[in-house]
Amino acid sequence: MYNEQVRRGQVSEKAKFEYAWCLVRSKYIDDMREGVALLEGKRQIWLYLHHKGRSLLASAITLQNQIL
């Protein structure tokens, strides 16, 4: 869904979030980085992640800090 919307030039926030959510949970570091980049600056999404899984949030924040 996300890639199709990218090709059309209009990506919904829902599609962007779902794609980023999958990437952050990937076993591949490059996918995780891309997911974190897509979520960057989205405070409400980080709060959602916090409620869904604190360990996932901690991993994503650690990864974000490594990228910066």
Image (cartoon, helix red, strand yellow):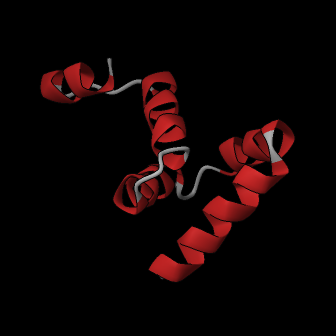
Measured as percent of width and height from the top left, residue 3 is found at: 24, 27
Q: Nearer the viewer, residue 2 or 12?
A: 2
25 to 57, vertically: above or below = above
Measured as percent of width and height from the top left, residue 12 is found at: 41, 24
50 to 60, vertically: above or below = above
Taking the view exactly as shown, the residue that stands out farthest to the front is 27
Taking the view exactly as shown, the residue that stands out farthest to the left is 7
Q: Nearer the viewer, residue 29 or 67?
A: 29
Measured as percent of width and height from the top left, residue 47 is found at: 78, 46
| Residue located 45% across and 43% down the image | 23
Q: Quadrant of the N terminus?
A: top left
Name the image quarter holding residue 4: top left
12 to 31, vertically: above or below = above
Measured as percent of width and height from the top left, residue 11 is found at: 33, 27
Number of dots carrying numbers? 0
Task: Report whether 17 appears left or right of 50.
Answer: left
Task: Report whether 7 appears left or right of 51.
Answer: left
| Residue located 58% across and 79% down the image | 65
| Residue located 43% across and 24% down the image | 15
